[in-house]
Structure formats: C-alpha cells, structure tokens
Image (spheres, rainbow, N blue to C red):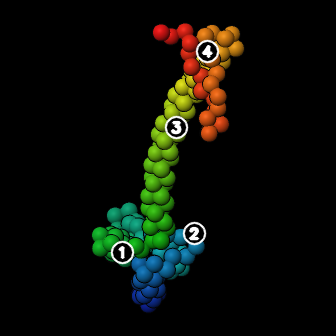
Amino acid sequence: MGRLTAETRTRNEAVIRAAMDRLLAGVIPPGGGCDLKTLAAEAGVTRTGFYPKGERPGPYQHLAEEFERRVKEAQAAGIVTDPRASQIERLKAQVAELKERVAERDADLAELMAFKALAISRLAAQHEEIERLRGQTAAGGGLRHLPATRGGTARVLRTDRP
C-alpha cells in the first residue's frame, strides 16, 4: 500500500468519524460490536491504520484513541453503546434470578419430601394401631357393641376396665 495523500487521509478521517458517531449512537451492524474492528469495517479502512507502526503512530491512531475515550465516557454516563453488552448483562441477571428461584424450589422440595416422609410414617403407625384394635375386636377382647347413633357409627365400650 502506498502513502496516503492528504486528501485521502482527510476523507478517510471524515468517514471514520461518521462511522464512530453511528457506532456510539448504537447503530451496530450484525455480528459487530462497538470496537475498533467494527469501526474499521464500517469506515472501509484497514485496522492497521489505528495502531502504531514501529516508532511512529498509525495514520488514524488519534481517532482510535478518541473512539476508545468516547466509548468509556458513554459507558461512565450510563449510555449503552453496544446493545449486545446490555443484552449480556440482562441475561446474566436473568440467569442469577433463575438460579435463585431454582435454589428456593429445591429447598421447598426438600421440605416437602421431609413432610411426606413424616406423614407416611405417622400413617403407617396409625394403620398398625387400627389393625391391632381390629384384631382385638375380632377376638372379642372384652368389647361390646352399642347401637348405632344418628351419625351412623357404632360405639364400642370396653368391658374389661373397672
């Protein structure tokens, strides 16, 4: 590549500044970001012009420094220059919220499982007691049936107690 003429350099700087303004306004092309690579692609110049060439600065290095400064100022002011960055932050917050909800549900599930185990244990003990009492009743262990009450249930009195 040959040397840049003053006219070409001035024209390229104007194109770079216009691309810089678009990127900082949030007009990011698909697959791009608010960075030097996208700036160079949008302006139609090579990226190497933004970096120093050995001991001397690149022809557009001052514009790269200005762009990075403006990006940092916009970020400090709370302006979102790159929609992908805000989307990433939003998704990170959503993931954190979902992790918290899953942890809460896991805790609830563990509590319900413990309650279920306790309830089953109590039902089993009650069932055993009912079976024992039925066995006593069938054996005639000193129980006498009374006539049914209005509710339809029969009363049983123990006759073996004093």
Numbered disc in front, either 2 or 4: 4
Q: Secondary structure at mark 1?
A: loop
* Dots 2, 1 in contact, CB < 8 A: no
**Residue 5, position as x, y percentages in the image:** 45, 86
Residue identifier under label 2: 31
* Dots 4, 1 in contact, CB < 8 A: no
- Gap between marks 3 and 2, in whole Å? 47 Å
Label number found at residue 162: none
Task: Identify the residue shown where x is 52% and y is 37%.
Answer: 112
- Gap between marks 2 and 4, in whole Å? 87 Å
- Gap between marks 4 and 1, in whole Å? 86 Å
N-terminal of the pair, mark 4 or mark 3, is 3
Q: Which of 43 and 122 lies nearest the eye of the viewer?
A: 122
Single out the residue that lies furthest toward the right. 138
Residue identifier under label 3: 112
- Gap between marks 2 and 1, in whole Å? 20 Å
Question: In the rendered view, does 128 fall on the left or right side of 100?
Answer: right
**Residue 126, position as x, y percentages in the image:** 57, 23
* Amino acid residing under circle 3: Leu
* Amino acid residing under circle 4: Leu
Task: Identify the residue shown where x is 67% and y is 11%.
Answer: 140
- Gap between marks 3 and 1, in whole Å? 46 Å
Residue identifier under label 4: 143
N-terminal of the pair, mark 3 or mark 1, is 1
* Amino acid residing under circle 2: Gly
- Gap between marks 4 and 3, in whole Å? 40 Å
